[in-house]
């Protein structure tokens, strides 16, 4: 983990309020793993005061580049859309605990909703490069808001899509449910929805696969010092006791039982 | 080279820089971003005599030029502190000022004695911003009598320099400062973050899980400078100034108002290089202005 300057290679509008930022920053790009994040200083002033945390979207290690997919939600991300090619950007990273991809993995599934799909693209990228088969279950309010379609297709992933506007009753995890009796997954990874996290967790209990979730929380430092980004999670598998865990340090990737509870 | 050494009640700092407790190097990781020797003294996270989970989330909200937070000073148990933190703190090659807090006089007395007996620390900072549970919840540091009584009691527990960290209470801070001085405090740290809150206009409910929090960062700096200015006139013990410091200019401002040392707090969350940069810049400033000794600027705005 270090604070270092990167150079903006490209800052491109993708769709709706979603943008893709490509940064040349070899010292972070060569170390960062799927599920980890970087803290971005959106300008060189102290306004906005805090950095903004973003999960890794993709890395191009040989070129020393990384990509962050961001949604414009407030002052910080609005300012980010004005970042110009060739300018310098101050980053801290890599931060946090990323996804665990088991060594023996042959087949995994990613379950993402909206912009929460971003870190799953990084994971699918790493997995497919290692020859792991990746099934993607993607959900959004509307079909044109589904994230990472092009990337997942390029990686040769099998895609299952769901939009609320087209079907308000079913969930994207219903596709997963249908596959599960016959298909064995070595890990299922979810991000972007509490409902989908609960579904994935329940399926993981029934079928015995490992399941992880990436969480989001407002952060100040991003490296464990301020204790500001805690969420209340289950402490251990045996008891139902809860405790505060830092999203930036113990997470952002947690086991789904930590979030949902073993007995849920 | 100009002299940067300052002396806070016998704590010899090789420069005037320390950190606000709870803003730097948790988990015993004090050298994540720069060598610890760059600091004049280290002030690690505040410890309580008992385990404490801190406040419910959300704990943070961004403010204009600042951070609104209600972390609630979480603390591990004393046993874990001794096992996990003390071995790391023992190896720190600069003075370590341990910050402590309690909810009653008894809890302060207990934690001060325990910390003092470890023989590891160069000084003890008493965070006086905790509500006094036995006196209707008013913080110790808002009440001259409560502060005086508390300092007298903890004074008997330790020979280490005692630093009273004061809340920014406009109406009383000068009286509290005088009270802690007369009760035997060796130095004053100020200001702690002022109480503050935010309400979500959409839900019309408080943003923070604890409802009320405290404001830190550049937004509070002018308040802090003013209060240091007032307290400097009223006491003769040294002041460690803090509240929104981000660079060497702020350091000079606080020292000119009367602080002999300064603490970098919330800025550590945003710019991990703020301290090394400010140290270099302060040195250059002193050279450029022909100031041989950083102590010369302490209180110079009053003359």
Image (cartoon, coloured by chain):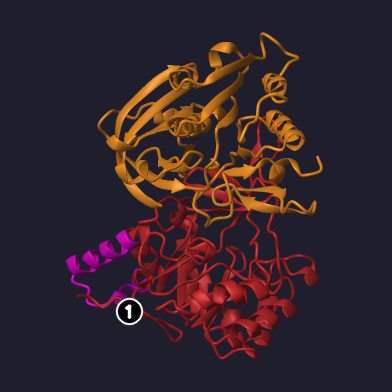
Chain colours: A orange, B red
Q: Position of residue B197 (x, y in %)?
A: 64, 47
Q: Which residues are magenta?
A: B276-303
Compared with B255, A223 (above or below) is above
In the rendered image, residue B296 lying in the magenta stretch gets the answer: yes
Q: Read off the chain for label 1.
A: B
Q: At 19% across and 75% down in the image, what residue appears?
A: B1
- The secondary element bearing badge 1 is classed as loop
Q: Which residue is mark 1?
A: B5
Q: At 62% across and 39% down in the image, what residue appears?
A: A212
Q: Position of residue A24 (x, y in %)?
A: 30, 36
Nearest the viewer among A5 and A171 is A171
Q: Quadrant of residue B113?
A: bottom right
> Is residue B234 shown to the viewer in this render?
no
In the image, taking residue B217 as reference, residue B78 lies left or right, namely: right
Nearest the viewer among B216 and B102 is B102
Q: Position of residue B5 (x, y in %)?
A: 32, 79
Nearest the viewer among A57 and A185 is A185
Compared with B86, A78 (above or below) is above
């Amino acid at each position: 983990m270090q604070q270092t300057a990167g150079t903006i290679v490209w800052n491109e509008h993708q769709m709706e309020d979603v943008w893709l930022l490509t940064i040349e920053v070899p010292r972070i790009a060569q170390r960062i793993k799927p599920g980890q994040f970087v803290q971005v200083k959106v300008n060189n002033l102290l306004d906005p005061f805090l950095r903004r945390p973003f999960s890794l979207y993709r890395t191009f290690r040989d070129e020393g580049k990384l990509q962050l997919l961001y949604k414009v939600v407030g002052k910080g991300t609005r300012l980010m859309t004005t970042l110009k090619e060739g300018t310098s950007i101050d980053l801290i990273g890599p931060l946090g605990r990323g996804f665990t991809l088991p060594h023996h993995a042959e087949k995994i599934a990613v379950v993402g909703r909206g912009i929460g799909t971003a870190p799953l693209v990084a994971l699918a990228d790493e997995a497919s490069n290692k020859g792991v088969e990746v099934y993607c279950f993607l959900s959004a309010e509307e079909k044109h808001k589904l994230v990472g379609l092009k990337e997942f297709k390029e990686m040769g992933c099998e895609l299952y899509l769901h939009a609320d506007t087209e079907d308000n009753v079913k969930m994207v995890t219903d596709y997963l449910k249908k596959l599960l009796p016959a298909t064995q997954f070595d890990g299922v990874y979810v991000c972007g929805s509490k409902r989908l996290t609960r579904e994935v967790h329940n399926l993981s209990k029934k079928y015995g696969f490992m399941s992880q979730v990436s969480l989001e929380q407002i952060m100040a430092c991003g490296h464990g010092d301020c204790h500001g980004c805690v969420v209340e999670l289950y402490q251990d598998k045996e008891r139902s006791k809860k405790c505060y865990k830092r999203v930036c340090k113990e997470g952002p990737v947690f086991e789904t039982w930590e979030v949902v509870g073993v007995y849920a | 080279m100009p002299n940067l050494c300052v002396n806070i009640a016998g704590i010899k700092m090789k420069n005037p820089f320390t950190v606000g407790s709870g803003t730097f190097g948790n988990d015993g990781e004090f050298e994540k971003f720069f060598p610890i020797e760059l600091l004049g003294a280290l002030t690690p996270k505040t410890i309580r005599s008992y385990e404490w989970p801190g406040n419910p989330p959300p704990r943070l909200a961004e403010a204009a030029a600042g951070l609104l937070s209600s972390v609630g000073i979480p603390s591990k148990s004393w046993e874990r502190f001794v096992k996990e933190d003390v071995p790391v703190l023992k190896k720190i090659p600069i003075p370590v000022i341990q910050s402590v807090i309690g909810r009653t006089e008894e809890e302060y007395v207990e934690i001060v004695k325990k910390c003092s007996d470890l023989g590891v620390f160069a000084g003890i900072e008493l965070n006086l911003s905790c509500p006094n549970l036995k006196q209707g919840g008013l913080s110790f540091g808002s009440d001259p009598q409560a502060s005086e009584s508390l300092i007298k009691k903890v004074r008997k527990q330790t020979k280490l320099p005692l630093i009273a960290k004061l809340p920014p209470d406009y109406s009383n801070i000068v009286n509290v400062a005088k009270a802690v001085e007369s009760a035997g405090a060796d130095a004053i740290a100020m200001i702690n973050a002022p109480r503050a809150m935010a309400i979500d206009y959409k839900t019309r409910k408080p943003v923070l899980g604890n409802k009320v929090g405290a404001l830190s960062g550049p937004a509070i700096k002018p308040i802090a400078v003013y209060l240091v200015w007032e307290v400097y006139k009223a006491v003769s013990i040294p002041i460690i100034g803090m509240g929104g410091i981000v660079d060497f200019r702020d350091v000079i401002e606080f020292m000119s108002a009367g602080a002999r040392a300064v603490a970098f707090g919330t800025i550590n969350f945003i710019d991990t290089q703020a301290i090394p940069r400010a140290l270099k810049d302060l040195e250059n400033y002193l050279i450029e202005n022909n100031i041989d000794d950083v102590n010369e600027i302490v209180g110079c705005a009053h003359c």
